[in-house]
Image (cartoon, grey):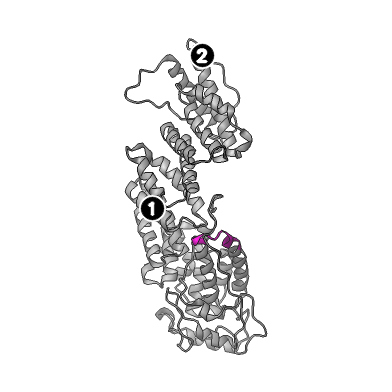
Amino acid sequence: MPMAPARAPAAAPVLAPPPVAAEAGGILAGTPAPLLAETTGASAPPASEPMAPIPEPVPTAAPAAHAAAEPAHDTHSAPAPAQDPPAEPSPAHADTSAPHARSAEAAPPAGRTDIYPVTLVRRLQRLQDLIAAGSTAGIAQQRAMITEMDAAFGDADPSVWQDPANARALVMYFLGGGNPAVLRAIINREPKPNIDEKLLTGSLLYLEGREEPALRQLGEIDARKLPNGIGGQIALAQAALTVRSDPAKASRLLEVARLLMPGTLVDEAALRRAVLVAAQAGDLDQFERLSGQYFSRFRHSAYAGNFRQRFAAALSRMNVLATPDGLSRLDALLAPLDEEARREVFLLVSRSAIVEGKTALATTAAERAMVLAPAASRDAERARVYLSAAQAATPDRYKTAEEALKAIDRARLDPSDQALLEAARRTAELIRRADEAPSQTTSPAPAAAPSAPAVVASAQPARTAGDEKPSAALTKAQAKLGEIDSLLKDAPR
């Protein structure tokens, strides 16, 4: 089935394919559009090695000859030799290839036919795999490539999408980051792409955020029966559509995505999401196992910084460090990371714990981060803020915390930590006032709430079973914490 005119183009087209030899051994990959919208995290480590350049476009002797050199499937195997015939069309569309070919000969094409979707999608996927391996520079290159491919695919003649391999590449591309408005325009043309309509329409609905109709289209598709390249992406989309209603099913679908596309950005995204699903389910063993895999395999990913933030928040909610062996288990989990990344995790855990009012956890994590931080560094300053913020809500430690908070250089903190600092200072001040006036039955109305995270709003004094009964000052301090909770509950985090 022709994907190009019978004559060779005068010059190499935009986004023309690289040499076929460059495709050999490549692993197909991709990632759903929602993944590409996620932040990478400011502290993501640089790539462990320079990113390989994208091969330069080369003109071909004849587009038809190049089409014969491209495989008509999207599995993980290397491309077929140039002498191999193209694969047969899928059974559901076996009758349609000849009529489409005749109509393409009978009428001039309405758009571009000098593009090679299968090859172009492979190039994008190779770049995305480099991002999963740690290339932060690849994100900017990916953005530029997607812009070019949106334009090229949008201008393509509908006959291009009558080749089943190209139609699969179309779906894979848009699940991998393409503009869904371009896909909708392609679907609205006749003839429609030569692929199962449920895959096509369901993918578009998913990308447009229309979850219920998307699930009706994609929900019954068995991703394991599709070619690996498209199957992994469909499983990832299905997981996103089912995670709220059926987390266990979403977890299974994420496992399918990983099995179909190991070592790719789909694998990285599925593993990253599976960790969060396990945390949501409260499955500590699964959470630790999957987190360990992520830190071992994808710790250099451009998305690892974002993952560490979510990991720390989940770790705080699950209160892993509250168990007797919690600290040693966390140390073992973070062992694959370098010292800077481990320090960042402890800082994030401490801050998340402060937000949730878990002062003991916040203190432990801040003390661990302080040990790992170089003296007089910004991270050391952050650790002191978090440690003092946790202690500021504790009546027997607020005095020490108040003095420490006064000594912190506010200018060295980012805006969110500056807000936390002000909230902690306010907390310590209110508790001191309550402690200094134990006989006062009512307290003056507090000043206007600072614009700060609700970091110490619900913090309760940490006590052990052997602590003495709360004093009048402690009771008043707890009442003050209730006032702070009221003041700061709507403040940004």
Q: Nearer the viewer, residue 366 or 228?
A: 366
Q: Nearer the viewer, residue 19 or 121?
A: 19
In the rendered structure, find residue 163 and report the number of the disc placed on it: none
Residue at 50% from the left image edge and 11% from the top image edge: 440
Q: Is residue 419 left or right of residue 397?
A: right
Whether residue 307 appears in magenta in the rendering, the answer is: no
Magenta residues span 131-140
Q: Is residue 329 left or right of residue 340?
A: left
Provide residue 48's location: percent of width, then percent of height.
51, 60
Q: Is residue 363 left or right of residue 3?
A: left
Residue at the farthest front position: 375
SS class of the residue under badge 2? helix
Q: Amino acid at mark 2?
A: Glu
In the rendered structure, find residue 436 and report the number of the disc placed on it: 2
Quadrant into which the C terminus falls: top right
Provide residue 461's location: percent of width, then percent of height.
42, 25
Q: Nearer the viewer, residue 129 or 47?
A: 47
Quadrant of residue 313 in the image? top left
Whether residue 137 appears in magenta in the rendering, the answer is: yes
- State how far apart marks 1 and 2 are (Cα): 49 Å
Residue 109 to residue 152: above or below: below
- The residue carrying mark 1 is 292
Circle 2 Cα neighbour tier, 10 Å, few/some/many (<14 / 14–19 / ≥20) = few
Q: Amino acid at mark 1?
A: Gly
